[in-house]
Image (cartoon, rainbow, N blue to C red):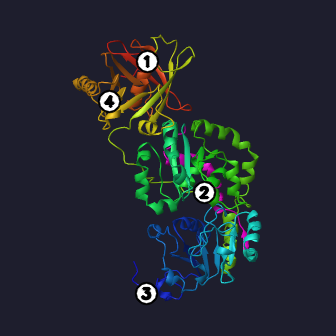
């Protein structure tokens, strides 16, 4: 940290001998909060590779969501100036992605850009104590563009031609300095789509799984503020193995409450598998490129998701915060709201079926950018013109989003989470049935099982959608919650065992869980010992062990098969974890009989 009154070596006017590289121009990056800082860094990539340009940063200190800015700057090693020092220094260009703060005090031509998908929000007046909202969009009215009769920015960046008409109404004197360059973020997202597989792998999403992105802006009308139960509902209703759910939370919500507090509030959801990346990097962008669907609100991420062609629903939408006539207002009319009465999966399926041909949606998303793929080049041209420097000769194309790394994960408990398990059984004769108490049958061919699992905590808490009546409950030995441990149908040991310990361990599991019907132990040779309460015991093994074949999953598959065929079952079953997944072959035989042909031993 620099001492007070200590001049930063890169500050204009500082002794030249302090610097290793002698820049010709100095740019000031103006940060309002973390939201604006993330977009600002995206814009400043137009100077990458040019040693003629030195960039310094400052923060206006005017945002109520200023927490996190210092950490953001320190983590990225941004050369930082205090605001009172920055406004006393002359720069060749300043770039800001928010209209907040005393921007008129900056001694430099100011380029003003949005920090979201264009200009869609209405904000309260900047005047202290004013309770009304500005009539137009934040960033396109004199309320935020003029100070003491003078226009604040020297250049205003727009993403689409439609914004010119709104600027003409809100602040006509700004039209001469308005420049339609396109949307750099949208360009990056589209340039990233070919790398969908890489993003999915980094987020831990298998090829046979669907990724649902839940997007929340900030404020009471946001998804988290007005419809926070949707996070629980998604985790409860959507099969745990078929869907991954990721929450993209606006930095203002994250820093307004604190990351620790958000994680604390969402702890049960994190335990149920929710992905919650911090908002300070591009993980949300990678997630959109990896996603199969979204549920959003009136935030920019929702518009970007729709612009990528993702099917989606609105979980919340604050009309009072959305500027009339904006693309976001039109999106609010075009996207369906989440219905509390219909299964969420069915609503997402309908969106995937209907929205690709929805002309209203196509009209909305066409207003994200007027110059697809051209924003970086157009923005660089504008910046270098304002700096009075020759633009670098190398062409500038949109850069794909970085592959996420070190994605934070929830702490892993020593026991697997309790699961409600449904198994759809397809017998060899082609009939479909959901498992239940059926008479013993001899399978005409390999039985097929589709296993669907739901986190028990989430499913039980989602009151409109209680636990399925045709599911069994699976827990791991040592489950601390008595309501699950005592009600479990299937109990699995935590660690492999062998020899005499196998029988002892199954006896202990049956004694500790008097309500369970089947216990399972993985043997050290890779096979599984499964023992029913009446003493019938079975061995099971996988022909080619899939990564998802845990002891718990194996036990649930055998239990479902037992319900279908009774204790005389022997042979093999094809198990799928998701409808689109490749089936794995599980062989089962009763202890004391010969194993099925070609089984592993």
Badge 2 vs badge 1, beta-carbon distance below 8 Å: no
Q: At numbered mark 1, what does the secondary structure look like: helix, strand or loop? A: helix
Side of 167 where 296 appears, left or right = left
Q: At numbered mark 2, what does the secondary structure look like: helix, strand or loop? A: loop
Q: Residue under circle 1?
A: 563
**N-terminal of the two: label 2 or label 4?**
2
Q: Which residue is found at the position 50% from the left and 75% from the top?
A: 61
Side of 184 where 37 appears, left or right = left
Instruction: Name the mark on residue 299.
Output: 2
In the picture, the quarter occupied by the N terminus is: bottom left
The residues bearing labels 2 and 3 have C-alpha atoms spaced at a distance of: 40 Å
Considering depth in this image, is 380 or 429 the residue closer to the camera?
429
The location of residue 10, given as percent across then percent down, is 50, 82
The location of residue 555, given as percent across then percent down, is 39, 26
Considering depth in this image, is 19 or 508 the residue closer to the camera?
508
Badge 2 vs badge 4, beta-carbon distance below 8 Å: no
Instruction: Name the mark on residue 486.
Output: 4
The residues bearing labels 1 and 3 have C-alpha atoms spaced at a distance of: 78 Å
**Residues rendered magenta in the picture:** 178-207
């Amino acid at each position: 940290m620099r001492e007070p009154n200590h001049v930063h070596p890169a500050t204009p006017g500082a002794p030249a001998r302090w610097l290793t590289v002698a820049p010709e121009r100095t740019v000031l990056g103006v940060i309002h909060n973390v939201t604006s800082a993330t977009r600002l860094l995206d814009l400043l990539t137009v100077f990458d590779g040019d040693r003629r340009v030195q960039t310094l940063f400052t923060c206006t200190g005017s945002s109520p969501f200023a927490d996190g800015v210092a950490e953001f700057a320190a983590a990225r090693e941004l050369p930082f100036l205090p605001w009172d020092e920055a406004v006393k220094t002359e720069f060749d260009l300043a770039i800001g992605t928010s209209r907040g703060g005393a921007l008129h005090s900056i001694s430099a031509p100011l380029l003003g850009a949005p920090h979201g998908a264009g200009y869609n929000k209405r904000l309260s007046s900047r005047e202290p104590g004013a309770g009304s909202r500005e009539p137009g969009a934040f960033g396109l009215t004199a309320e935020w563009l003029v100070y003491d009769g003078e226009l604040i920015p020297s250049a205003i960046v727009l993403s689409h031609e439609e914004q010119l008409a709104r600027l003409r109404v809100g602040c006509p004197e700004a039209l001469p300095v308005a420049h339609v360059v396109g949307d750099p973020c949208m360009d990056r997202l589209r340039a990233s789509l070919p790398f969908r597989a890489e993003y999915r792998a980094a987020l831990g999403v298998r090829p046979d799984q669907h990724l649902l992105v839940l997007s929340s802006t900030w404020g009471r009308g946001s998804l988290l503020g007005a419809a926070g139960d949707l996070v629980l509902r998604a985790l409860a209703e959507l099969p745990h193995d078929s869907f991954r759910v990721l929450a993209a939370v606006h930095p203002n919500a994250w820093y307004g409450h604190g990351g620790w507090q958000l994680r604390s509030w969402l702890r049960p959801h994190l335990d149920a598998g929710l992905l919650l990346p911090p908002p300070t990097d591009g993980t949300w962008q990678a997630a959109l490129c990896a996603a199969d669907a979204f549920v959003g609100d009136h935030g920019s991420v929702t518009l970007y998701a729709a612009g990528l062609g993702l099917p989606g629903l609105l979980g919340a939408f604050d009309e009072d915060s959305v500027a009339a006539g904006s693309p976001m207002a039109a999106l609010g009319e075009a996207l369906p709201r989440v219905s509390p009465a219909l299964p969420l999966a069915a609503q997402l399926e309908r969106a995937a079926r209907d929205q690709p041909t929805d002309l209203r949606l196509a009209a909305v998303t066409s207003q994200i950018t007027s110059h697809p793929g051209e924003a970086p080049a157009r923005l660089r041209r504008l910046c270098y013109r304002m700096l009075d420097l020759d633009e670098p000769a190398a062409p500038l194309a949109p850069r794909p989003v970085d592959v996420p790394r070190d994605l934070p994960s929830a702490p892993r408990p020593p026991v697997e989470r309790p699961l409600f398990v449904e198994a759809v059984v397809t017998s060899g004769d082609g009939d479909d049935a959901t498992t239940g108490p059926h008479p013993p049958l001899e399978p005409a061919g390999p039985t097929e099982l589709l296993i669907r699992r739901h986190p028990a905590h989430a499913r039980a808490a989602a009151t409109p959608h209680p636990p399925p009546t045709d599911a069994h409950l699976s827990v791991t030995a040592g489950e601390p919650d008595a309501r699950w441990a005592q009600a479990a149908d299937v109990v699995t040991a935590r660690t492999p065992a062998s020899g005499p310990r196998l029988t002892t361990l199954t006896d202990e599991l049956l004694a500790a869980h008097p309500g369970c019907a089947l216990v399972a132990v993985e043997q050290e040779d890779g096979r599984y010992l499964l023992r029913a309460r009446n003493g019938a015991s079975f061995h099971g093994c996988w022909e080619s062990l899939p990564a998802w074949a845990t002891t718990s999953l194996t036990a649930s598959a055998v239990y479902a098969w037992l319900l279908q065929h009774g204790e005389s079952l022997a042979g093999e079953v094809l198990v799928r974890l998701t409808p689109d997944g490749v089936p794995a072959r599980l062989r089962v035989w009763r202890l004391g009989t010969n194993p099925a042909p070609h089984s592993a031993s």
